[in-house]
Amino acid sequence: MKNWLLFILLFGFAALKAESWTVLVYMAADNNLAQMGKLDINTMESASQPAGLNLIVQADFPEGAARYKIQPDNSTNITSPVLTDLGAIDSGNPQTLNSFIKWGFNRYPSQRKMLVIWSHGDSWYKKDDGKWICPDDGAENLMSIANGDLKIAFAGTPKLNILLFDACSMQSIEVIQEVAEYADYVIGSEELVPVYGFPYETMIPLFSENIELILTQIPELYVQSYLPGAGINPGEQLWTTTCSVIDTALMLSFHDIFIPALHYFWPVAESIMPIRQKCYEMNTGLADVDIKQFIMLLREMDPNAVHLSSLQYIWTNMVVSSAFTSPDTSVENIGTAALWFPDSRYNFSNGWQRYQKLKFADTEWLTLINMMLIDDIPPDKPSLQSQSIIYSTLYLHIQPPADPDWVYYRLKLTGSGHIEDFCPGSLWADSFLIQISISGAGSYQLWAIDRSENFSEAITGSYDWTEPQVSMFLSPNPVRGKDLATLYWWTDANISGQARLEIYNLKGQMVIKKQLGEVITGENRYLLSAESKFHSLPAGRYFLRLKLGSKYLSSKLTILY
């Protein structure tokens, strides 16, 4: 009986230690990395595989794509069985990656899940004329981090325990925040990755151990594989290599603390540029720096800076493990993750519009860089999308100019001389509404102003005003986001009865009819998104009619998407 209990305890302990893993490798090698991809598959076959590991590779080469279940083999050829012959595919399409993830984890369920994205890479900011990530030469396509392709790739997929980028320069704070909700840990290099990639022959055996050991060992194994005389690097030169494991659980905290830390330095933005010059530079345009090194240098410059100690503490806890090598013996405190920090106006101008699309842009990091580079460039002139008057209120629907800074707006009513400042409800809003009380006809000027107090060219306009019985307008119009569409109207005390909304398509067919209740004196509004049928309307032109008692008001309505 005692022997039986001992067996159960030992078996249970072993089961807890040896977790099952499914590791999916998305090898986008329909490009000049094809031969290295085949070499890496052969390297995977030569490794000692733990019993609980499913190692599945989807490899796309110029001659076609296939899915393999990697089996141990010591030959120089790929001998693993082909699970599916896929033929010609587009590995630069995020839907292709999405399909592979769903298929792989559904067919090979396990306790732990890992995805390797294997290809060229260049962080978030390369345009479609370079490596970027997962370029497919046959399909002439690639994935865009800034345009949200990874969000498409991970939509509806199981959350990963580990996401590993076997691609150049992908371990940046910008990329990490884009994928943080999809993976517990992100592994990659903030620097270039040599063509041999990650050392699968030493990494694969780790999957017989617990996840903590895997996470601490991979960065060391990576940099060791490129040391002089290590086989991959047969010479005596020490290469620059970096690798880290980032815990995404604290990404939101880092983001939130980064914001007030930046605001502290706004008044002395120009003083940070000398700190930037001390940082190790890397990647395209030498525009990236290491976050750990940058924060440490900032603290040395101003030990009392608000929130920097908290920021450093959070980052230290986010970095599970890291390692680096450099032929420059003066380089230190790097190897964690990159931060885009261009030190020239040229590099900044080439990247900020794509950067604005990233989640990390909400920190207003672009604003601080712009100030550090001495911002004397005024914002472009904003665009007036529509102008309406309801009773005694002037409504201006504004499309903001593209600008790296967060801008506000100054409205001057020419006749009265009244001046009022307005702020959009969110950073870099697609559009926003200005409303101001008026008491007669007049004209106005409107400027966009950035944080360096640069003024744009003014929008100018005029308006007539008479005290109406009823009036109506729709904002925004055209509608670019249906959740934002709002109908406004005003009625005086002489109007009574029922209010009814009707929307017709160009064929004259009524597509929406909504009773809005009793007519109420004064200003009213109705959020069109509260009407479920509005969401289902396809893009196109429509006619909107509002019945207020015996009065009818009409307007054209355009839905762009």
Image (cartoon, rainbow, N blue to C red):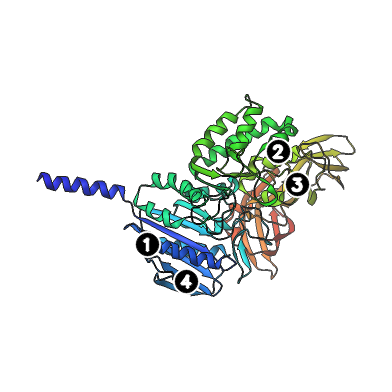
Q: Which element type, helix, strand or loop, lies under badge 2?
A: helix
Identity of the residue drawn at 71% across and 52% down: 476
Q: Earlier in the sequence, mark 2 or mark 1?
A: 1
Q: Give the Cα separation between the discs numbered 2 and 1.
A: 49 Å
Find the residue positioned furthest to the right: 415
- In this view, the residue in front, 45 or 140, is 45
- In this view, the residue in front, 31 or 201, is 201
Circle 4 is placed at which residue position? 66
Q: Which element type, helix, strand or loop, lies under badge 1?
A: loop
Q: Which element type, helix, strand or loop, lies under badge 4?
A: strand
- Which of label 3 and label 1 is nearer to you? 1
Type of the residue with mark 4: Ala
Residue 519 visible in image: no
Up the image or down, 379 lies above or below 513; here it is above
Q: Give the Cα separation between the discs numbered 4 and 3.
A: 45 Å
Circle 3 is placed at which residue position? 403
